[in-house]
């Protein structure tokens, strides 16, 4: 869980990074940018707003051999170790980004390197390094009084309501490559930002593992349970899956299969599906892990518990009490109409 409201900008460096493949230049500022109070507040909101609104998926710097060969990791570590050298390291970071601009689709833009204090991560106060890039320029009007007339002047600039690209690196878990959040609003060049420049891999903590496993279950329900049984059983399977995670602090796959897969014939199907699809979700060797309540709550909001019928009727099932759907809803076939039906039992209608 992150809290960025008390964050403070300790230093800010701004450079302009062109596209190397188009022979555009790299402009390195010689000194850090001096912030006034108004700009401080505006830029802090510009840099951090997207991270407050983003679902948390953490990354970590990654290198095939050793992190000591990861140039961006080394530059960020230097800022953490010696904040007075932040501007010098920001120039190295700008050069690294410029070197990755090898594709003509990559847009030039301004690079901001920020040293933050008072970032809160899991109730721990940390410093951090923010690396942000503005790419898209937006039209806006300025007005000037000239000889009794008000003239409109068209200019272009950065929209402070939306960050184009950004990485927020927390000074935590250095040996594992730090904990990193990433933003990329312009996903036409994701490999350039996430893989080539940042060179990160997913930080597989309990939040990531819980979210990934539930997403895997959701796809299993759609691809296997629904064709084998019906929509009601697909929804009920996901109900049971989410509730299993919600009531257990630690996930154990054997226990999960016994409690959630009521049809034993689907257990080998589940295991086969996991063998085939696990790399997509990064859960190949995942059979036990701590459960993240945050990830469970987020999944519960996203997973639909509605059966949509082709007769323009919807049946909404209760996620909290799935046994109601099993006890009081029956599916059948009407020979006369040649149609399926759902039979719903109840004592009285809710007047709310």
Image (cartoon, rainbow, N blue to C red):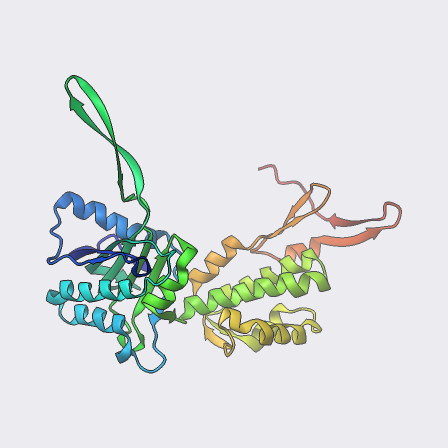
Residue at the spot 67% in from the left edge and 64% down from the top edge? 225
Q: Is residue 126 visible?
A: no
Q: Residue furthest front?
A: 23
Taking the image as shown, residue 341 lies to the left or right of residue 246, namely right
Taking the image as shown, residue 28 lies to the left or right of residue 280, namely left
Q: Residue furthest right?
A: 336
Residue 320 lies, in percent from the top left, at 56, 56
Taking the image as shown, residue 187 lies to the left or right of residue 301, namely left
Residue at the spot 27% in from the left edge and 62% down from the top edge? 98
Residue at the spot 28% in from the left edge and 66% down from the top edge? 99
Residue 162 lies, in percent from the top left, at 33, 47
Residue 318 lies, in percent from the top left, at 59, 52
Quadrant, the N terminus: bottom left
Q: Which residue is at the front of the view, 9 or 338?
A: 9
Q: Is residue 196 visible?
A: yes
Quadrant, the C terminus: top right
In this view, 306 is above or below 144: below
Q: What is the quadrant of residue 294 in the picture?
A: bottom left
Residue at the spot 52% in from the left edge and 73% down from the top edge? 279
Q: Residue furthest bottom?
A: 65
> Total of numbered circles in the picture?
0
Q: What is the quadrant of residue 275 in the picture?
A: bottom right
Residue 11 lies, in percent from the top left, at 15, 58
In this view, 316 is above or below 141: below
Q: Which residue is at the front of the view, 239 or 81?
A: 81
């Amino acid at each position: 869980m992150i809290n960025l409201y008390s964050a403070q900008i300790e230093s800010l460096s701004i450079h302009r990074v062109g596209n190397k493949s188009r022979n555009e230049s790299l402009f390195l500022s010689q000194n850090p940018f001096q912030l006034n109070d108004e700009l401080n507040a505006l830029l802090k909101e510009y840099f951090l707003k997207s991270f407050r609104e983003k679902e948390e998926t953490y990354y970590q710097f990654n290198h095939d051999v050793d992190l000591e060969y990861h140039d961006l990791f080394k530059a960020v570590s230097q800022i953490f170790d010696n904040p007075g050298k932040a501007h010098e390291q920001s120039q190295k970071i700008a050069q690294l980004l410029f070197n990755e601009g090898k594709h003509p689709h990559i847009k030039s833009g301004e690079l901001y390197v920020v040293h933050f204090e008072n970032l809160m991560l899991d109730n721990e106060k940390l410093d951090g390094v923010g690396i942000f890039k503005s790419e898209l320029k937006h039209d806006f009007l300025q007005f000037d009084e000239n000889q009794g007339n008000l003239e409109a002047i068209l200019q272009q600039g950065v929209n402070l309501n939306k960050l184009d690209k950004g990485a927020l690196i927390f000074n935590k878990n250095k040996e594992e490559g730090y904990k990193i959040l990433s933003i990329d609003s312009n996903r036409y060049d994701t490999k350039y930002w996430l893989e080539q420049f940042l060179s990160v891999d997913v930080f597989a903590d309990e939040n990531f593992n819980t979210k990934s496993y539930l997403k895997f279950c959701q796809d299993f329900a759609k691809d296997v349970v629904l064709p084998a049984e019906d929509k009601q059983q697909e929804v009920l399977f996901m109900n049971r899956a989410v509730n299993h995670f919600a009531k257990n602090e630690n996930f154990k796959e054997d226990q999960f299969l016994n409690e959630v897969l009521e049809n034993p014939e689907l257990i080998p199907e589940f295991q086969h599906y996991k063998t085939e699809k696990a790399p997509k979700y990064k859960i190949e060797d995942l059979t036990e892990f701590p459960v993240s309540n945050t990830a469970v709550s987020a999944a519960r909001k996203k997973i639909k518990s509605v059966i949509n019928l082709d007769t323009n009727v919807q049946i909404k099932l209760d996620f909290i009490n799935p046994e109601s759907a099993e006890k009081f809803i029956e599916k059948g076939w009407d020979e006369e109409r040649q149609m399926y039906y759902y039979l719903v039992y109840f004592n009285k209608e809710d007047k709310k």
